[in-house]
């Protein structure tokens, strides 16, 4: 692990996300319909989500972790499948809390 | 029990707080709703605010504004992967009142501005999300539903300053041509250094700061890079078109790494400790991609109204948010005083925007987004400029100096830039900035 280039990218991304404060709500503000995602060939959300919250599954669907969401709306913009994403804001006082942005 | 105010403002960002401040100053009851635990918690931007817009609402603002550093050097950099040309403008005048640009943190700027609205009499309610518009007869907006129990709030005018994703403006049908093509994603890292280290690396004293805008550093994606000095941290990041990002197989954090590792940038950031990573959408469509901003009982301001200026040389949002928020607050006062808060009664809002920098700047620079995000400006022109500049200053003795004409001919060919498109873009540039 002495060479930084050999570090696992996932590990370094976790370090990035660990710098951000989240007040996680009990319920998800974004819900993904994985059945719809199975027919999606682009899966643009997986590339574009800055918090890297969309994970392709072995069955061709998409898993989503709402807990560390920036609430930016990028996934909603790039999703090209009607009904694949239900998106709103977390309940008041919850979600991301930026301190130095 | 339903609460009732003259004006309810949704979102305590710069637009919302300016709207609430203006409306409260006029003696009306104002509720300022914020879904975050404090104003600014949900907000992220590159890092520079141009506060002269506050001269009217808050004269002497510089005595109180929570500034990190005053921008005294503004650099624009065109880059290829191995070279760059930077134009840096330094001005001592920008280090003294009334200043020009300042780096500020949204967790400090937004609460400060909201506090001005509260001091004027507005009621700030945090940790409360507006979930829907309340409609009255004929569909006119008569308030908002919130996610608090019994959380309906009635108002004569609702001012939606709920940001780039404005659910309220969409619900009101003000975004008929909503397209991802009009949005960019900003992603950045804030890296920690000591104040002295930043002063040393960037050649700064006192509270002076640096702003570097970059083009040609986003691995072929339309957009740009930026670097801003805070007092004890440096913000570095990218802004890229959302559609192109989705089509490319490059993740946002990899684009930031690309900027950080550019040879002109890397030495400035070495050893910085990552303090925070963040991202946010930006409405960059400009004048020709704006939503409607007025309907019966409803005004839309700030990012929610598409009022963010992304014109290459000029990248401004907070001032447009404040300017439009103030105009919305004043138009609401005017409409309430006249007893007509229909779209017609609220027409003073767009008139104010048209008569001020808010729409004047956008209209003048309406061609800027297309020009700046074009493949020519993003890739071929940086190659052309960097190629010419490098060869101009490379001494090739014993060969004599090549001269600019030959360099232009050589590098124009190498960068595949046609004379016709160069001329066309020169004209567009002149019409945009001239």
Image (cartoon, rainbow, N blue to C red):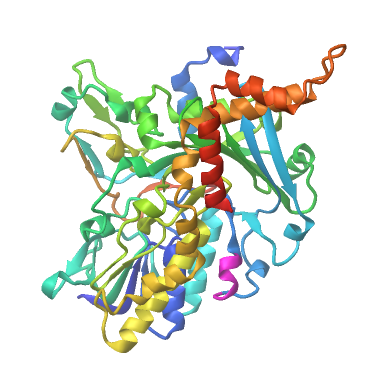
Name the quadrant of the N terminus of chain B.
bottom left
State whether the magenta stretch is mostly helix, strand or loop: helix
Q: Please tell me whether residue A59 is drawn above or below residue B132 in the rendered image.
A: above
Q: Is residue B279 magenta?
A: no
Quick check: B409 above or below B425?
above
Of residues B429 and A30, which is closer to you in this image?
B429
The answer to whether B138 appears left or right of B223 in the picture is left
Instruction: Reply above or below: B41 against B385.
Output: below
Residue B318 located left or right of residue B268: left
Residue B420: percent from the left, percent from the top? 52, 32
Furthest-bottom residue in view?
B338
User: Where on the picture, by quarter, is residue B426?
Assistant: top right
Q: Among all residues in the image, which is located at the extreme right?
A: B398
The region drawn magenta spans B52-57
Specify the quadrant of the image occupied by residue B6.
bottom left
Which residue is located at x 47 percent, y 19 percent? A9
In this rendering, the answer to whether B64 lies above or below B413 is below
């Amino acid at each position: 692990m002495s060479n930084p280039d050999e570090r696992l990218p996932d590990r370094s991304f976790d370090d990035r996300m660990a710098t951000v404060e989240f007040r996680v709500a009990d319920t998800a503000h974004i819900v993904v319909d994985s059945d719809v995602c199975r027919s999606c060939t682009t899966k643009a959300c997986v590339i574009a989500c800055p918090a890297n919250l969309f994970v392709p599954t072995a069955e061709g669907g998409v898993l989503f972790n709402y807990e560390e969401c920036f609430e930016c709306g990028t996934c909603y913009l790039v999703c090209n499948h009607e009904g694949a994403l239900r998106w709103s804001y977390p309940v008041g006082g919850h979600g991301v809390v930026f301190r130095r942005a | 029990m339903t609460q009732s105010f003259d004006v309810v403002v949704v979102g305590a960002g710069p637009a919302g707080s300016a709207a609430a401040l203006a409306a409260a100053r006029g003696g009306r009851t104002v509720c300022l709703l914020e879904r975050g635990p404090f104003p600014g918690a949900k907000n992220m931007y590159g890092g520079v605010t141009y506060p002269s817009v506050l001269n009217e609402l808050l004269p002497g603002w510089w005595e109180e504004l929570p500034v990190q550093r005053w921008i005294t050097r503004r650099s624009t950099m065109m880059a290829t992967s191995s070279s760059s040309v930077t134009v840096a403008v330094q001005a001592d005048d920008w280090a003294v009142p009334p200043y020009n640009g300042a780096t500020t943190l949204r967790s400090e700027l937004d609460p400060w501005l909201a506090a001005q609205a509260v001091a004027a009499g507005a009621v700030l309610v945090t940790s409360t999300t507006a979930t829907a518009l309340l409609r009255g007869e004929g569909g006119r907006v008569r308030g908002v539903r919130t996610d608090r129990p019994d959380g309906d709030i009635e108002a004569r005018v609702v001012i939606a300053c709920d940001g780039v994703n404005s659910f309220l403006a969409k619900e009101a049908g003000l975004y008929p041509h909503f397209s991802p093509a009009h949005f960019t994603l900003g992603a950045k890292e804030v890296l920690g250094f000591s104040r002295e280290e930043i002063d040393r690396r960037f050649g700064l004293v006192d509270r002076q700061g640096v702003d570097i805008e970059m083009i040609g550093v986003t691995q072929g994606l339309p957009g740009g890079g930026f670097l801003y000095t805070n007092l004890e941290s440096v913000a570095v990041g990218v802004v890229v078109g959302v559609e192109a990002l989705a089509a490319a197989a490059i993740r946002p954090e990899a684009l930031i790494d690309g900027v950080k590792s550019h040879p002109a940038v890397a030495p400035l950031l070495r050893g910085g400790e990552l303090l925070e990573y963040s991202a946010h959408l930006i409405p960059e469509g400009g004048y020709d991609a704006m939503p409607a901003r007025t309907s019966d009982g409803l005004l839309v301001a700030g990012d929610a109204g598409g009022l963010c200026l992304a014109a290459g040389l000029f990248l401004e949002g907070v001032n447009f948010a404040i300017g439009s928020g103030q105009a919305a607050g004043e138009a609401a006062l005017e409409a309430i005083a006249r007893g007509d808060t229909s779209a017609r009664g609220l027409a003073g809002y767009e008139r104010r925007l048209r008569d001020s920098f808010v729409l004047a700047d956008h209209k003048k620079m309406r061609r800027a987004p297309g020009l700046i995000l074009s493949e020519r400006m993003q890739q071929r022109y940086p190659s052309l400029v960097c190629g010419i500049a490098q060869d101009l200053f490379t001494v090739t003795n014993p060969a004599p100096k090549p001269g600019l004409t030959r360099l232009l001919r050589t590098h124009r060919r190498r960068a595949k830039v046609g004379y016709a498109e160069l001329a066309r873009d020169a004209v567009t540039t002149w019409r945009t900035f001239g």
